[in-house]
Image (cartoon, helix red, strand yellow):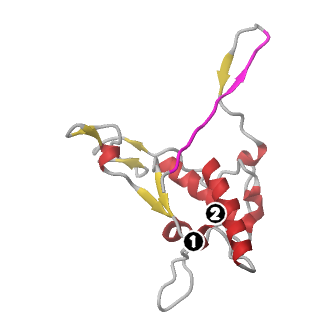
């Protein structure tokens, strides 16, 4: 399933009367340290504060958080590399699996995830995944219905939960 993103700039008119375009202002939640899952409930919470947008820096780059070979805008045989390599993040494997191994318990913990099957927790997982995909420059994702939304008491409630979470996914 493809997703689209749009980031809008906030326009303001200073006292001089000239219009200027400024970046979206940072909310208090961006600078506040998140110590428990509910701290991430604000729509502007930052899930990966130490990770910026991953950029192509070339094969000689020493930056461990850079693309060395994948340059999305490089033209290869008449098409951009991003059109040849259409990467996708799979929600279950990246944001729901807990790294169980056959001889032990979970090896992955996520500070925003309280392990509950609630809509609030589902929203946190989705916001974290979209921040992750945005920073990687990934334009596509895949999921199963129960991966993103909690199961309800009946089919009607399960479908309603999926509708609510998928509405958030479309907004992001």
Q: Residue at x 57, y 71 (%)?
A: 96
In the rendering, at what x and y percent does residue 159 appear?
68, 69
Above or below for 153 versus 95: below
Residue on which disc 2 sits? 125
Mark number displayed over residue 79: none
The answer to whether the residues at label 1 and label 2 have Cβ atoms under 8 Å apart is yes
Which residue occupies 66% across, 25% down?
Answer: 22
Magenta: main secondary structure equals loop
Q: Residues within 10 Å of mark 2 (few under 14, many from 20)?
A: many
Q: Examine the rendered structure and indicate whether residue 105 appears above or below residue 155.
A: below
Q: Is residue 38 left or right of residue 81?
A: right
* Residue 112 visible in rendering: no
Residue 150 is left or right of residue 78, and the answer is: right
Q: Earlier in the sequence, mark 1 or mark 2?
A: 1
Residue 9 drawn in magenta? yes
Q: Residue furthest left?
A: 77
């Amino acid at each position: 399933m493809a997703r689209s993103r749009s980031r809008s700039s906030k326009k303001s008119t200073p006292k001089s009367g000239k219009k200027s375009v400024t970046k979206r202002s940072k909310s208090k939640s961006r600078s506040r340290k998140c110590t428990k899952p509910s701290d991430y409930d604000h729509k502007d919470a930052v899930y990966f504060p130490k990770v910026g947008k991953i950029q192509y820096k070339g094969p000689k780059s020493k930056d461990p958080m850079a693309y060395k070979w994948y340059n999305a805008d490089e033209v290869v045989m008449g098409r951009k590399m991003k059109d040849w390599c259409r990467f996708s993040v799979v929600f279950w494997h990246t944001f729901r699996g807990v790294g169980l191994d056959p001889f032990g318990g979970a090896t992955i913990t996520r500070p925003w995830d309280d392990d509950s099957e609630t809509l609030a927790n589902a929203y946190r997982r989705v916001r974290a995944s979209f921040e992750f995909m945005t920073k990687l420059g990934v334009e596509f994702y895949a999921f199963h219905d129960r991966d993103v939304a909690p199961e309800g008491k009946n089919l009607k409630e399960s479908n309603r939960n999926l509708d609510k979470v998928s509405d958030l996914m479309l907004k992001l």
